[in-house]
Every structure is written in structure tokens, then in C-alpha cells.
């Protein structure tokens, strides 16, 4: 079976906004919408740029991802009642921007880890969904290429036009 994905920007109190790739006519599986030209990806990139919210905590949440941990003082829950970010997003309306939006941000910067990745206009895949994926490898259509998949999930990330003075990382495109 295939795993479905939603892009989520976290706020101080949980999910701030989420973006559904199917709202743009793109597939819900990771490999169906993690392209540089994807409108879903472009929407999230714009939100984490200076044109949107700015640096934000980002997660590409899979529906097969682990359930969320709850605070110790919260009401006890059955394991069957626990939710992951993918299912929790359903409680909010998805974000759907007006297009076209064509500004290209060359660098995706992780402020938490002091790392960045370069995004070329001719690259096939965009690194943001791959680096922020929670639950990858648990379903068909997931990213099968290399790199630190999911290692940036929930970190503070921004999209920039200027090269930062940080460690550069790379993905391989062997999907």
C-alpha cells in the first residue's frame, strides 16, 4: 500500500497550517509530489521564506508515521486513539494559496542544525519534503534515494536566496 503525505508547519501550540498535495492535482505519495516544480512544495517554500511566515518548524507527515507522544499530565489514551500529525491535520482547514508564484529560493536552511542544501532549478527532486519526512520507508511511493531522510523534521527551516555560512549537505537522487 502507498503512504500519503501532508506538508505541515508547526506553531507553538501544534499544527499552524498544512498543505495537501492533492489540492494542486498532485499525487499524495511522496515520490508523486516532491519535485522542484511541485506547487505543493513551492507553497511551503514560500511560507518559510521572507515572503511568508519566515523560518518555521516543518514536517512532511506520512499517514504511516509514529503516533504523537502526549504530555504525562494529559488524560490517558488508548493506543488506538493516538494520532500522528497526518491525522491531526484533519482538524484544521488546509492552506490553499493563489498561484502563480514563481520566485526560486536556491537554499533551504536548517537553523536548528546549522546546515543547508542547495536547490537547483534543473534538479528533479526538492530536498525539503525528503529532509523533513516523518514515516518514510513504510509505504509504496516513499523516497528510496539516499541522504539524511527525515533528519530535519520539526527543525526550524527557511528558504533563502543568499548562500548561508553553514555546513552544506546533499541528497542523492536514486529514487
Image (tube, rainbow, N blue to C red):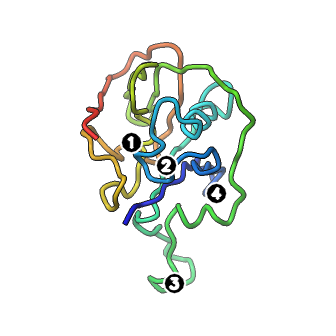
Whether pointer 1 and pointer 4 mark residues with C-beta atoms closer than 8 Å, the reply is no
Query: Which quarter of the picture shows residue 119?
Result: top left
Q: Nearer the viewer, residue 22 or 82?
A: 22
Query: Which quarter of the picture shows residue 131?
Result: top left
Residue under label 2, please give it. 59
Q: Earlier in the sequence, mark 2 or mark 4?
A: 4
Q: Is residue 66 left or right of residue 148?
A: right
SS class of the residue under badge 2?
A: strand
At 40% from the left and 33% from the top, the residue drawn is 125
Q: Nearer the viewer, mark 1 or mark 4?
A: 1
Q: Is residue 56 left or right of residue 61?
A: right
Q: Earlier in the sequence, mark 1 or mark 2?
A: 2
Vertical order, 175 against 116 (above or below) = below
SS class of the residue under badge 1?
A: helix
What is the CA distance from the residue labelled 3 to the residue labelled 1? 31 Å
Q: Nearer the viewer, mark 2 or mark 3?
A: 2
Q: Earlier in the sequence, mark 3 or mark 1?
A: 3
What is the CA distance from the residue labelled 2 to the residue labelled 4? 15 Å
Amino acid at each position: 500500500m502507498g503512504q500519503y503525505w501532508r506538508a505541515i508547519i508547526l506553531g507553538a501550540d501544534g499544527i499552524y497550517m498544512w498543505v495537501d498535495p492533492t489540492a494542486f492535482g498532485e499525487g499524495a505519495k511522496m515520490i508523486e509530489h516532491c519535485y522542484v516544480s511541485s506547487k505543493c512544495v513551492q507553497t511551503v517554500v514560500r511560507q518559510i521564506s521572507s515572503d511568508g511566515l519566515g523560518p518555521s518548524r516543518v514536517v512532511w507527515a506520512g499517514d504511516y508515521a509514529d503516533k504523537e507522544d502526549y504530555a504525562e499530565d494529559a488524560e490517558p489514551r488508548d493506543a488506538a486513539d493516538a494520532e500522528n500529525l497526518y491525522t491531526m491535520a484533519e482538524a484544521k482547514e488546509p492552506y490553499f494559496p493563489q498561484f502563480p508564484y514563481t520566485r526560486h529560493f536556491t537554499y533551504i536552511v536548517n537553523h536548528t542544525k546549522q546546515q543547508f542544501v542547495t536547490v537547483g532549478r534543473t534538479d528533479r527532486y526538492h530536498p525539503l519534503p525528503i529532509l523533513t519526512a516523518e514515516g518514510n520507508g513504510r509505504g509504496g511511493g516513499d523516497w528510496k534515494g539516499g541522504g539524511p531522510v527525515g533528519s530535519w523534521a520539526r527543525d526550524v527551516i527557511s528558504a533563502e536566496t543568499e548562500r548561508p555560512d553553514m555546513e552544506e549537505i546533499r541528497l542523492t537522487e536514486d529514487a
